[in-house]
Amino acid sequence: MFSEFMIRAMAAGLGVALVTGVLGCFVLWRRMVYFGDALSHASILGVAMAAGFGVSVYLGVAGVAIFMAFALVTLTTRWVWGGAIGVISVIALRWRKLIVSTVSEDLAASVGVSGKVEKLIMTLCLAVVVGAALKTVGALLITAFLVIPAAAARAMAATPEAMVGVSSAVGMIGAVGGLSASYYWDWPAGPAMIAACAALFVASRLKSV
């Protein structure tokens, strides 16, 4: 039996896995991997600023991440479940627009969809996820948690909707497996979850050969 602490950790891990599974697909489709990497490293600055000003770590991380989101969009165009539900709701409501703008910004413009607006929304969603996932996965592993489940799903899904579902499932299985390994064998929780997701990725590649 798991302790109450582990049950809470599982709930947080599942929340992070659910939303990173969805968002990770767009990160791959839009080739935004470096966005997640830059935002996750920027979150470390948020921790330092929060400590310096005596405010909540989550406020510091979210503030820096959102600032970086606006900065990254400008440069390239010249808590856990609450954040997860919010991000997934935004993606669900704007699914068609996000897909069209991901396929082609010119195509999006031809049907009245602003590619720049959709990119900004996606980047802000990424910033929220980075802030929410900081304590669960760790600043330096968030990018891996975004990319690996989505990469595993790519080999097992034929449609964007199926890829999103499989990606979330892979992340959630990896989260439960990694946290279980952490509990029973005293492994670091974040790396254990990433290792479990990586094992599922390898299995998906072997299956597709």
Image (cartoon, rainbow, N blue to C red):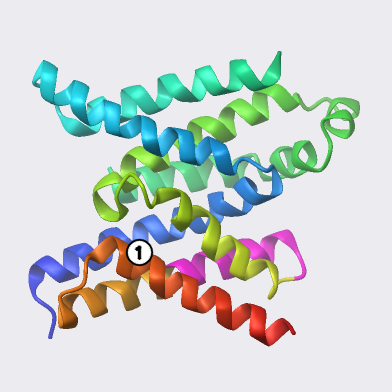
Is 153 situated above or below 73? below
Q: Is residue 74 left or right of residue 136?
A: right
Q: Residue at x 65, y 50 (%)?
A: 28
Looking at this view, is 77 or 112 the one in front? 77
User: To which quarter of the image does residue 119 belong?
Assistant: top right
Looking at this view, is 174 or 33 the one in front? 33
Q: Residue at x 57, y 30 (%)?
A: 121
Name the residue type under label 1: Leu
Instruction: Quickly name the residue at label 1.
Output: 14
Looking at this view, is 203 or 102 the one in front? 203
Q: Residue at x 62, y 69 (%)?
A: 153
Q: How many discs appear?
A: 1
Q: Is residue 89 found inside the magenta-colored segment of the image? A: no
Q: Secondary structure at mark 1?
A: helix
Look at the image and give the residue range highlighted in magenta: 158-171
- Please, what is the dominant secondary structure of the magenta stretch? helix
**Coordinates of residue 120 in the picture (x, y in percent):** 59, 26
